[in-house]
Image (cartoon, rainbow, N blue to C red):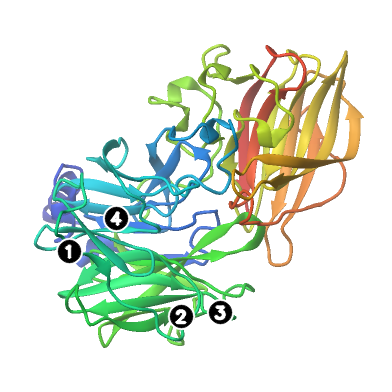
Amino acid sequence: MNFKSTFLYGFCFMLCESNNIATYASSMPASFSDTVTISNPMLWDDVPDPDIIRVGSDFYMVSTTMHLMPGAPIMKSHDLKHWKTIGYIFNRLTDSPKYNMIKGTVYGRGQWATSLKYHNGKFYALFAPNDNPGGDTYIYTSVNGRKWVLVSRLPHFHDASLFFDDDNRVYVFSGNGHITELTSDLTHIKQNGLDQKLFDRDNEETGLLEGSRMIKRNHKYYLLMVSWPKGMPRRQVCFRADNLMGPWEKKVILESKFGGFYYVGQGTIVDTNQGNWYGVIFQDRGGVGRVLTLNPCHWINDWPMLGDSNGKVPSTVKVIVDHAGSGKAQSLVDNENFDETQHPYDLFLHNWEWNHNPIDTDWSLKERKGWLRLKTSKICHNIFDARNTLTQRMEGPASNAYICMDISHMKDGDCAGFAAFQGDAAMLQICKDGNKRLLHLLQSSVTLDPDSKSITHVKDSIQASIELKNSIIYLRIDADFNVNKDIATFYYSYNKKDWHQLGGNFKMIYDYRRLFMGTRYAIYNYSTKNTGGWIDVDYFNINTK
């Protein structure tokens, strides 16, 4: 490379690091771009109800987290392949005591299907908790996607999409194709504004239409939705119009099996700086939850047709992006050493979420440097009743994770451990029984009231047990999410080298009627007799395959 080329390259790099990244990225020479090959699933993690946008050369995505707190994670990527959680829209929800597990729970409810937009230099997010009855709609804003402030609370809009039109009028698309106009400051429904149903479902659409995502391209409006025709698999459909008042046309834009599973459906489309378009559509995939697929988007007769040349989800997709692979590889699951100094904001800048609102006085990164302390202050009956349960996604196609736990300060009746957490859960559970510390492989299945989501029954089954000899114990869970597997196996060790399996395999399942999430790694501690005990966790290590 000669001096002139070196100077120009260095100048380009400095510009890209400046505050003008978004403006400059669109004019970068093609030689600065790179090709990334992405295998499907694009993300083999539970990332349901995605919305994804591009700001400059970066992509931002939001997902559903329901009863997990903090909620509505914002994920960022330079290349659509490597994603990192950069923040959460809210730390907790407080509209109902059920978020604190009082008079019920919000398992499978809470925050759903957030809409993410960028307008006039700010991010906006809209979501409506699926409480019973339906909760208010929240609108938040942010200047950087990390820290969010509440703008307004509006009536409930189901599975809604926020939309800023070219004339700066603002709309919400929700339900089965309803449009509602908002005031320009997003604080109220606009008086005498648009508020009506845009179209009726045709005879093909005998089931639900939901998951609204609205975009505009070349002066045309495109409303993407997931379709549930009766007796048929889910599919992605698109409604198109030249004017918001119609007429609206419909087309099926993706109807595909993939990877041994029956259907793919619900998501949105996004473009790159190079002008290429892609669809990000989730797939129900058993015990791991709802994973994301990436699909080429070909504009055919002004329709965004998804999939390969046969309209099917491809095994790999090549994406041309700017500064591909910038920085180290990133993931939605990661190791954790619970070092307070590495969390300038709080523990949850990364990938961890509590089960319901946490009791803040019952956990600490300060009381024992480099360790997470989980304390007990209320009597619980089982893991489903324990708020201070810390969770992170499992990842496919296979992964294993282990923790180091100090159990020397547990009290009689305390239960702590490491779980594959779902409506049907399995866990390496340590129980303090008098002076004994017993390690069980425990399987638990919860029954919830369909209205209040109160815990009505938990069926426990101890599969195997040993008495522990040491106060420092290593617990490991291996997860296999390959087709027809969804198997978890459980191990313990005293030295992190010699691992011993406890019990047999556990079949992980996905059940939308209860927790409505993929299986998660969970670290927990609760008391059944006496409060005031605690455990310390040194680290969490995860390996994916």
The residue lying furthest to the left in this view is: 167
Earlier-in-chain disc, 3 versus 1: 1
Give the residue number, with chain letter if any, for mark 3: 230
* 227 shown above or below 106: below
Q: Which mark is residue 424?
A: none
Characterize the local packing of mark 4: few (<14), some (14-19) or many (20 or more) Cα atoms within 10 angstroms.
some
**Residue 9 seen in the figure:** no
Give the residue number, with chain letter if any, for mark 1: 29
Mark 1: which amino acid? Pro
Secondary element at image label 3: loop
- Nearest to viewer (mark 3 / mark 4): 3
Earlier-in-chain disc, 3 versus 4: 3
Q: CA distance from mark 2 to mark 4?
A: 42 Å
Earlier-in-chain disc, 2 versus 4: 2
Q: CA distance from mark 2 to mark 1?
A: 46 Å
Question: Residue 188 at x, y = what percent?
Answer: 20, 47
The answer to whether residue 527 is left or right of residue 375 is right
**At x 30% / y 48%, what residue is drawn?**
125
Q: Which mark is residue 205?
A: 2
Earlier-in-chain disc, 3 versus 2: 2
Give the residue number, with chain letter if any, for mark 4: 323
**Circles 2 and 4 in contact, beta carbons < 8 Å:** no
Question: Residue 184 at x, y = what percent?
Answer: 13, 50
